[in-house]
Image: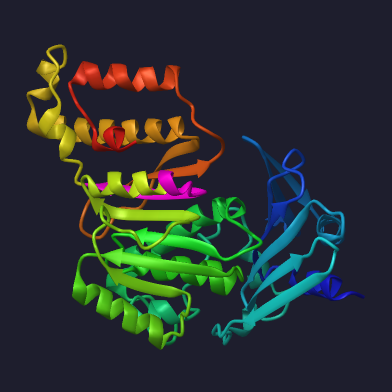
Amino acid sequence: MSELQELLEQILDQELIQLILSNTRDAAQGEKLKVRPVLIKEKLYFQETLYLGTKVFHTNRRKEDMKQRLEACLEKDGLFRQAQIHCESMDAVVLVSRKGAVSIKKKNKNANRNNTENKGRGGEAGLQKLSHDRAKQYILQEGQPVDFLVGLGVQSPDGRIAKARYDKFRQINRYLEFIEDILDKLPKDRCIRIIDFGCGKSYLTFAMYYYLHQLQGRDIQVTGLDLKEDVIRHCSELARRLHYEGLEFMQGDISSFTGADRVDMVVSLHACDKATDYALEKAVRWGASVIMAVPCCQHELNGQIHCDLLRPVLKYGVIKERMAALITDAIRANLLEQNGYDTQILEFIDMEHTPKNLMIRAVKTSGMRAGQASASVDRVTEFLHVNPTLKELL
C-alpha cells in the first residue's frame, strides 16, 4: 500500500473535517473539489463538491468509492496536483509533481481528546456530529491553539477563544475562506509576493501568512505596511518571536510606497478613503494576480456628488453618505474589470470599529477591457458630477 493510500485510509472517517483538491490540470473538468463527511440515514458518506466554472456538482460516496475517486484524482495523470486535508487530530498537505511523485506533509494537532465517547472511528457521538445541521467548521478550530492567535490574545495557550475576541476569530476564519477560494490563482512554482496595505494590528496579516505558509506549504514573502510606528514595532516583534521569517512590517504611506516591483497579491483591509484607491492602482500597475480590498470611509464622492434628478434622495445626509460609499466601490469594481480583472463585491464580517463589511475581490484574467465598459463608467460619473481618484490614477 502506497503512502497516499495509507493516508486516505486513515482520514476517511468521521474525524475528517474537510479535504480540498486544487491545482487542476484541466479546468474544463474541474477547478476544485471539496470532500466532507456527512451522515445520511445513520450511515457515513462523503460528500464531494466539484467546482466547474460557475456550476457546482454534489455527489455522495461511501468510503471505498471515495478512496478510489481521490486516488484517481491524485495519480500521475490525475486531475489535481494538491490536496489540503483538515482532520480533528491532524492536518496534511499532499503535493503531486509533474512527474507524478507524491510528497505528504503531516502536522498533528494538540486537541483535547478527553471525551472518550468521541474516541474511535465508530463511536455514536462521532457520527452524530456529521448531520447536515452540525456546527460551523472553521479552517482554524476552537480548542486547537495556533501560535499567532495566542500571541495576539485571541486564544489562550490551551486553545480557548477569548470571549471579547470571538468576533475577531470568526472574522479571521471568514477571511481565510476568501483566500482559500483564490488559492489556485497564486503562483505555484515560485515565491508568492504579497503586500498588505494598511495592515494595522495585523490579525489578518498573520492569519494569511499562517494559512499560506504553515498550512498550505507555500513559499511566500509578505510585507505589511502601516503609518503607525508603534503598531509596526509590535507586529515586527511578534513575527520574530514566532519565527515567521517570510513576514515583515514596514512603516510608510501607501501612495508613496516603492518597496516592490513585482507583487502577486495585494491586500488592503480598512485603508481609509482614497488610500484604498492608491492600493488598487498599485495592484493594477504590478499586474497582481489577486486583489482583496475592504474599503472604509469613502468620503470623496460624498463631497462631490451632485445630481438634480436625485436631489429628493440626496438631501438626506445619511442616505447621501451611504449611496456615495456604495457608488464609490461599484465604480472601483468596474475600473478593475476594465483593467482585466474578474471582480466581485462580497459581504465580509464587520470590522472591530466600523460596520463597513464589503470586500472587493478581483482576480486577474486578461488584458484591458476598454470601449463600452469605459464609456459606461464615464456616463455614471458625468451623471453624478463626480471624479473618483482611482479613475484618474488609472
Question: Which sits in the foreground, 45 or 223?
Answer: 223
Residue 182: percent from left, percent from top: 55, 51
Residue 41 visible here: no
Residue 72 drawn in magenta: no
- The quarter of the image holding the N terminus is bottom right
Residue at 32 percent across and 84 percent down: it is: 237
Residue at 27 percent across and 54 percent down: it is: 270
Q: Which residues are magenta?
A: 284-296
As displayed, is residue 198 above or below residue 105? above
Q: Examine the image and state in which quarter residue 346 appears.
A: top left
Residue 347 visible here: yes
Residue 362: percent from left, percent from top: 46, 42
Q: How many marks?
A: 0
Residue 196: percent from left, percent from top: 37, 60
Residue at 67 percent across and 73 percent down: it is: 92
Residue at 72 percent across and 58 percent down: it is: 42
Question: Which sits in the foreground, 278 or 345?
Answer: 278
Residue 340: percent from left, percent from top: 50, 35
Question: Which sits in the foreground, 161 or 29?
Answer: 29
Q: Examine the image and state in which quarter residue 111 appears.
A: bottom right
In the displayed structure image, the side of residue 165 where residue 263 appears, left or right: right
As displayed, is residue 269 above or below residue 321? below
As displayed, is residue 388 above or below residue 89? above
Most distant residue in the top direction: 309
In the displayed structure image, the side of residue 37 where residue 235 appears, left or right: left
- The quarter of the image holding the C terminus is top left
